[in-house]
Structures are given as structure tokens and as C-alpha cells.
Image (spheres, rainbow, N blue to C red):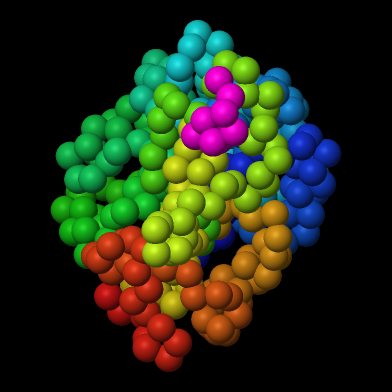
Amino acid sequence: MQLALGPAQYYWPRTDINQFYEQMLSTPLDILYLGELVCGKRHQLRAADWLELAQQLAEVSDKQIVLSTLTLLESNADFNWVRKICDNGQLLVEANDLSAVQLLAEAGLPFTCGPAVNIYNQHTLAQLMSLGMTRWTAPVEMSARQLEEVLNACDKKPEVEVFAYGHMPLAYSARCFTARHLGLDKDNCDYRCMEYPHGLPLESQEGEELFVINGIQTLSGEPTNLLRHYKQLCELGIDILRLSPQWQQMEQIIDAFDRARRDDLDPELLPPGVDGYWCGRPGLELIARSGSGAQA
């Protein structure tokens, strides 16, 4: 089982991003995904900056460095950003939109598909593999049972990655929710997302943490945590577990999953999080609790 650090979802200053990834080089992660996932307006690191950072990390580390593309393209500038990432000529690319899939397929390049590319059955999986997809990150709402059914129906399987820890990316919108919350126009947002390095929590009327707003992105209010399901993930033949970047306690999260793959599974090392989707239930539910095992 490999451990991957997914692309950063929040808007952090350039110096913080550089410091963060420098720290990640000393962790037991196997794969690092880099790139702007959410908003093409974010200007601390543009496409050329992400390419430069990725190449620098690739030169000094034996970890696999993967470049991630934007998820929702809204302008020619966004498309040009994606094209630059796809044309990098060196590193594997994670496509988060079908425009990236098309560019990579036309170039005859292998690629991975992120969780925003809607793949829910073996037929779509086979079609994308015929275009060059070598790795698939399952949608965050796919249950263990659904994933098992898809994989059992495949004649040929790609590498399979599962979103195992972090606030789940649920939706993307042309509207910027952060700007609206602050009474700003999207075109004149003043890059205020940077003031919320963990996103903006959104509670229900009952005070429950329901969502996290991150610019045009809607995330789950609670992080998913599949550490308690580690044995089941192994039994399903999952190749990679994706951990989403957190500004705080990232090393602790990585260590907990690394210990699990070294036969030292201890779910109490991390807060419980939620696992409803994985168990075929509403995503905000916590099914597996302390000492309850890990089977759905």
C-alpha cells in the first residue's frame, strides 16, 4: 500500500506552500500531487510556478511527483493553464477534467484521473484506460461495496487510489461562495480565500458542521477518515491511499497511516472523522467506532 499526498485544496501563500512541501519530503509518503485544483484566479503560484516547484522536488526526492490540473475550467486562461501542465514533458499528470484527459490522450501520454472525473462503472474505466489512464482515484462518495463490484467486473485494472483522509471535495460551482460571503464580486474577490487556510465552516441550523466553503469548492464539514478500514482496503486490493493536505498535524496523519501498513494499526492516533460514504450510508455519518472493527 502506497501513501499519497493529494493536491492542496486551500489557498496558501507561496512561502507557506514551499515550506509545507519541503517538510513533506522527510515523511514516508510515496507520492506527492502538486498543482492548483480549485481556482485559476489564485495567483501565488501560477502554472509555471507549480511546474518549477514540482521539478525541484523531483530532483531532490525519490517520491513520485504528479502534477494536478484544475477541476472546473471557466476561461481560456484556465485552459491554457491546463495545457501547460499537460505539456510539461517530464512528470505524470492527474486529470481532474475531461479537457485534460483529451489533451493527454491526444499526446499519447499516460495519466491519472482524480476523484472529480466521474467514473462509476467498469465500462467508463475501460474507456479511459484505452485513452492512457494508468491510475484511478475513486469518487469520494463511492462505497466499498460499489468499488468492489466495479473492480470485480474489470478485465484489466489500473492502479486504484482511495481518498482516505481529509475534507472531501463534494462540488465545484461557477459561483465563488467565499466572495459572496464577504459581499464581493467574484471578479473582484481580492483573493480573500487566503484569509481562510482551512476554508469557511458552514453549520446547519442545529449547529452541526455540515460543509466547508473554499472559494468555488464545497467540502465536507468533517474530514473522512478510513484508517479504521485499513484491513478492508488491503483486502480490496487498493494500491494507494490519498491523504489531503492539512496545514496542521499533517505529519501525525501520515504517521498513523504509515504505522498501519507496518502492522501497527491504531485508530486512536487520529480523531474519528466520518466514513459514511465508504459504508454505503450518508457521508456525514461515523460508522466504524473505536474497537468496532473495519468491515462495512
81 w.r.t. 232: above or below: above
Relative image position of residue 190 (x, y in whole percent): 68, 24
Magenta stretch holds residue 230: no
Provide residue 287's location: percent of width, then percent of height: 34, 76
Q: Nearer the viewer, residue 155 or 272?
A: 272
* Front in this rendered view, residue 149 or 8: 8
Q: Residue at x 37, y 88 (%)?
A: 292
Residue closest to the far bottom: 291
**Furthest residue to the top?**
76
Q: Position of residue 209 (x, y in %)?
A: 47, 60
Among the 4 quarters of the image, the one containing residue 255: bottom right
Residue drawn at x 29%, y 38% is 118
- Please say whether residue 25 is visible from this viewpoint: no
Q: How many numbered badges does the structure rendering display?
A: 0
Q: Quadrant of residue 205?
A: bottom left
- Residue under the point 42% across and 24% down: 174
Q: Is residue 292 visible?
A: yes
* Residue stretch in magenta: 177-185
In percent of the image, x 54 and y 40: which residue is there?
A: 214
Q: Nearer the viewer, residue 79 or 286?
A: 286
Say left or right for 187 vs 195. Answer: left
Percent coordinates x, y for residue 296 in the rendering: 27, 75
Classify residue 230 as left or right of residue 283: right
